[in-house]
Image (cartoon, helix red, strand yellow):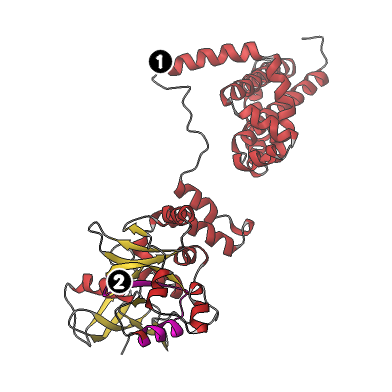
Amino acid sequence: MNEVPLGALFGVLAILIVLSAFFSSSETALMSINRYRLRHRAQEGYRAAQLVERLLRRPDRLIGLILIGNNFVNIFASSLVTIIALRVGGQGAVAAGAGILTLVILIFAEVAPKTLAALNPEKLAFPAAFIYTPLLKISYPLVWSVNLMANALLRLLGVETKRSSGTALSGEELRTVVAEAGALIPGRHRDMMVSILDLGKVTVDDIMVPRNEIIGIDLEDDWDHVLEQLEDTQHTRLVVFRGELDNTIGILHLRNILKLMVDGDLDSASLESRVRDAYYVPEGTPLQRQLFNFQGARRRVALVVDEYGDIQGLVTMDDILEEIVGEFTSDPSAVYRDVQNEGDGRYVVQGSANVRELNRTMNWTLPVKGPKTLNGLILEKTGAIPDAGVRLEIDGYDMEILQASGNAIKSVRVATPASPSGS
């Protein structure tokens, strides 16, 4: 090496440092690239993405190739610096040369390239794939031998080398990805996607119309009263029963009797003949499953029953869709039907109001794990039915009981945490 000019040695050293930077940066880029974006681009036919995806299927081989190359150029560079130091300053310059090389490699071949790769993984990973793919084929025997010995050592230490956690996301992880997508997904769409992921946590009990609020037709009522109900109802589907709700006959769609009503030919027998059998679902059914149940059964209304077969409430397809897209209303400025705004962050709320609907419509954060209604939430807190005028606080919301009967709370004044307390 004494015959080789110093300029040539420094040139080779510079090339080795560049190669070291390439190996370091490409390793970081390939390992930190977004696997889902990579898969999407590969499915679109982008050649570089397909090569990267193929390399990452066996990360042990890829890492083995990169480390072999990186260690080779770093050791070669260290030997070269030793030769240069001996020729320039003798034995005393060897230690200084080693220190300078360490600093140069640390800055120019490790920290700076890896930082750049972490910030722009695709820009470095895609070009590197065209180099590593043929290089892996050429050096495969060496890479295979190194991986064989490394995997044998790991197995001796009790590590399963063939087991891979994969890139699949759990529901909670996917929820976090969607929630943090930022400008990549419009806010409204992001909220809908999160709501879909949350459907499995919510059951029909949480959104059903409770038994005492179900509007239906009792065939034992006076016929004039039945006709008046049919003319005044705001619903297109009604429960039809005889005497009491547990004696339900089925569900009536008003379009099936519209012509008879117009012609004046509707009577109890003709109405009953157009009633469709009721569709029952057990309480506790997750909304995600019930959505598919509605689709499979081609139904839009279901009666929720307990383990004894007693009707507990009514749930509709629209109720589930509202969990995803929000409340359906023809008036965007309309306030939730059970809430009267008094101003200054104070509201008069009906005790029967559903807590989940209050949270969704009013942007409140009342606890939803437990009672479904505001009445139940207060009773759980107090342990008894409080008298009018009693005040309490639930999760920062100041509440004053306005009306209470013998078995339920009728209305409550609620002051939100940022507002003055109710008077």
Residue sitting nearer the eye, 367 or 157:
367
Precedes in sequence: disc 1 or disc 2: 1
- Residue at 68% in and 38% down: 43
Residue 156 image label: 1
Residue 48: x and y in percent read 73, 33
10 Å crowding of disc 2: few (<14), some (14-19), many (20+): some
Q: Residue at x 48, y 47 (%)?
A: 173
Tell me how far mark 1 sits from mark 2, CA to CA: 64 Å
- Secondary structure at numbered mark 2: helix
- What amino acid is at disc 1? Leu
Q: Is residue 218 left or right of residue 340?
A: left
Instruction: Give left or right: position of 148 versus 405.
Output: right
What residue span does the magenta drawing correspond to? 224-245
Determine which of the numbered discs, if any, sits on residue 37 in the image: none
Q: Quadrant of the C terminus?
A: bottom left
Q: How many marks?
A: 2
Mark 1 burial class by Cα count in 10 Å: few <14, some 14-19, many 20+: few
Q: Is residue 298 above or below residue 36?
A: below
Q: Amino acid at mark 2?
A: Arg
Residue 37 image position (x, y, % from top left):
64, 43
Residue 235 belongs to the span the image colors magenta: yes
CB atoms of marks 1 and 2 within 8 Å: no
Q: Is residue 53 visible?
A: yes
Foreground pick, 299 / 22: 299
Label 1, secondary structure: give it.
helix
Q: Give the labeled residue for mark 2.
A: 211
Please state, as top left, top right, bottom left or bottom right, where the N terminus lies in the image.
Answer: top right
Judge by depth and name the residue closer to the eye, 237 or 204.
237
Q: Tell me the mark number nearer the camera, choosing from 1 and 2.
A: 2
Q: Please provide percent x and percent y for residue 358.
A: 40, 73
